[in-house]
Amino acid sequence: MKFTSVLAAGTAAVLALGLSACGSGGDDGGGGGTADVTITMLPKNLGNPYFEASTAGAQEAAEELGATVEEVGPDTASPDAQVPFINTAAQQGVSALVVSANDPTAIGDALDEARSAGTKVVTFDSDTEPQFRDLFVNQASAEGIADKQLELISDQIGGKGEIAILSASANATNQNAWIAIMEEKLASDYPDIELVETAYGDDDDQTSFDKTAALLQSHPDLKGIVSPTTVGIAAAARYVSTSEYKGKVAVTGLGTPNQMREYVEDGTVEAFALWNPTDLGYLATQAAAALVAGDITGEEGDTFEAGRLGEYTVGADGEVLLGEPYVYDASNIADFDF
Amino acid sequence: MRTHARPWWQRALLTREMLTILILVVAWVVASAAVQGFDGPLTITYLVLDVAPVLLIALPMTLIIATGEIDLSVASVVGLSSVTFGLLHQAGLGLWVALPVSVLLGAVCGAVNGALVAYAGLPSLAVTIGSLALYRGLAVGLLGTTAVTDFPESWTDGATENLGESPYPVITLGLVALIAVFAVLLHATPFGRNVLDIGRSSEAARFSGVDVKRTLLILFVLSGAVSALAGVYYTLRYGSARGDNATGMELQVVAAVLLGGVSIFGGRGAIHGVVAGVLLIGVLSSALRLEGVTVNVINIVIGTALVVSVVAPRIAGGVRVRRRGAVGQRT
């Protein structure tokens, strides 16, 4: 009786293994002729629309290059969960691994092993410590993000008037760095725009919503709100869209198309910025292919052709910068789903 | 009543444990033949490194489940010990101090569980679901969302390094030693006999002179200490002490123990079966990952294997009882 039970369980498991082996055997036969470059795409987790967009970009690049991309990943974004997938890539001896790191150090050893097995490692979106990878494809620089947001708000309020910033928490490292640059540039390049207040919504939807209301009440002449955080901008847009300020107070900043779609469509928000994750995955894959081909080694000053995005140069610490943040507005928001 | 219709050597081979081992061997052979990249030396290295924490925790868990109890707080103890180890290191204490202190804290966590189960008489399922939340809460609370990562390389390398040129990591030695200790404890000592007796009937065990409470307390303390040791290993392997380390690992441990043939109702179980159960899950995950199967499908395969291994004996038992016309028989 005990025999039967485990026999049943084991048979099921081994059958599943055998079946999957047969299935993939077919795939290998189909694509093995031309595609020598194999790339494993390892996002932070699967089922995340943002990373689905970056993987779509990776697939697009792979098709142009005649390479094959396989997306693998854990279902939760914990660092240790990525390690088995990195190990698997090393076992398979893939040409390159393109990874968004869940932790800057925890996956370091596994990446080291993969690299000593000959796999090139490119990080994108989230970097590891520089010694663990060949290249980091950075989505945006702090300067680029600050500049783009000022450009947007200035366009939307006609170049002058009072604005406020709705940030994440008061000690959020990224936001504070961007705000510091924005304050500097406001003083030097936008003399007619006055920053009257920086409020903190703590990256909490309700708090950000309430802070938006408070900003609008305490500054009756407010012309625009810049929120350099996806939670903040969505909450601010939601408040403004149902208030008397709709169409009078501009809302912009960093947002995601899915959160902002209805506010762009109803006219509350004219345009907002974020990098384009599809381009990010595309560039990371192009960079990985250039490493595999030996066109670049990841040294500062190396240049490579990245298909439709043009030529890129490797910067300090092996970083490649995607470019200026991407602007989403009514004309293009329908093309994105993340 | 079981009649010994088969000769002893057949009975020895037809145990549930032998079957798990057989399936493990078949899975290994199938994977080596059919899965590209599986027969390389890296497979063994990664397999040992990956299964080590689950294997460690499964050893005391085998004894606990064999008594009919369960400890679901183990993964939270891993997290808490990881955080403790990291914080002590951050505070400037040597790792030779941080290691025993972390393990001791794990033993205390286990003692709290054990006291509530054995002396307050509360069901272990309820107690350890509570302490699962409690210890995880403490772990995340102590370190927040940050991580301690600056462990000395001599230690982190030690956790992943191989024995000379062999594909076996150094930690294999420690694992084998602990497996031997627990195998002897369960199968060759009066303590181990008591564990199985409690699992068959706690009442009967008490009447025959077994100190049930003390035995349970010892088991939970062991479970806490070994989980904490696994937590230190986990921290060094990934070079990262975080409050959310090993979240959900308790289910992998229980799955491996049950796949290894330990009865969830207590009273029967063997260490060699559990080791095979742990390795079986490791081999299946590794092979399916190499095949590019997504993690959800891997979970479905392992989950199905587990459910079948737990449900099938009940169904088979029911069928047999009905066929014999016997009533009230429970294996």
Image: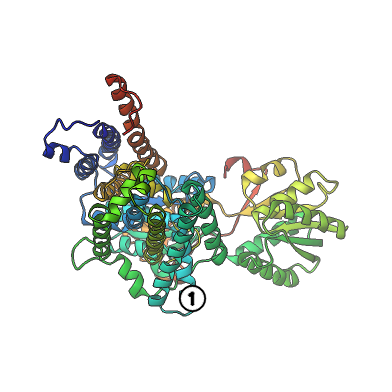
Q: From the viewer's perspective, is B149 left or right of B273? A: right
- Examine the rendered structure and indicate whether residue A185 appears above or below residue A26: below
- Type of the residue with mark 1: Gln
Q: How is the image coloured?
A: rainbow
Q: From the viewer's perspective, is A317 left or right of B143? A: left
* x and y, in percent, of residue B78 in the image: 43, 60
Residue drawn at the location 30% of the way across and 49% of the way down: B278
Instruction: Please state which of residues B33 and A31 is positioned toward the viewer in this rendering.
Output: B33
Q: Which image quarter holds the C terminus of chain B?
A: top left
Q: Identify the residue at the far right of this view.
A: A220
Instruction: Please state which of residues B94 and B124 is positioned toward the viewer in this rendering.
Output: B124
Examine the rendering and report whether any part of residue A63 can be seen.
Answer: yes
Picture quadrant where residue A31 is located? top left
* x and y, in percent, of residue A179 in the image: 68, 67
Q: Provide the residue designation for mark 1.
A: B90
* x and y, in percent, of residue B99 in the image: 39, 71
* x and y, in percent, of residue A124 in the image: 47, 58
- Examine the rendered structure and indicate whether residue B203 appears above or below residue A193: above
Residue drawn at the location 86% of the way across and 46% of the way down: A244
Label 1: element kind: helix
Picture quadrant where residue A222 is located? bottom right
Instruction: Please state which of residues A292 and A136 is positioned toward the viewer in this rendering.
Output: A136
Picture quadrant where residue B261 is located? top left
Examine the rendering and report whether any part of residue A104 can be seen.
Answer: no
- Examine the rendered structure and indicate whether residue A152 appears above or below residue B19: below
Chain containing the residue with disc 1: B
Q: Which image quarter holds the N terminus of chain B?
A: top left
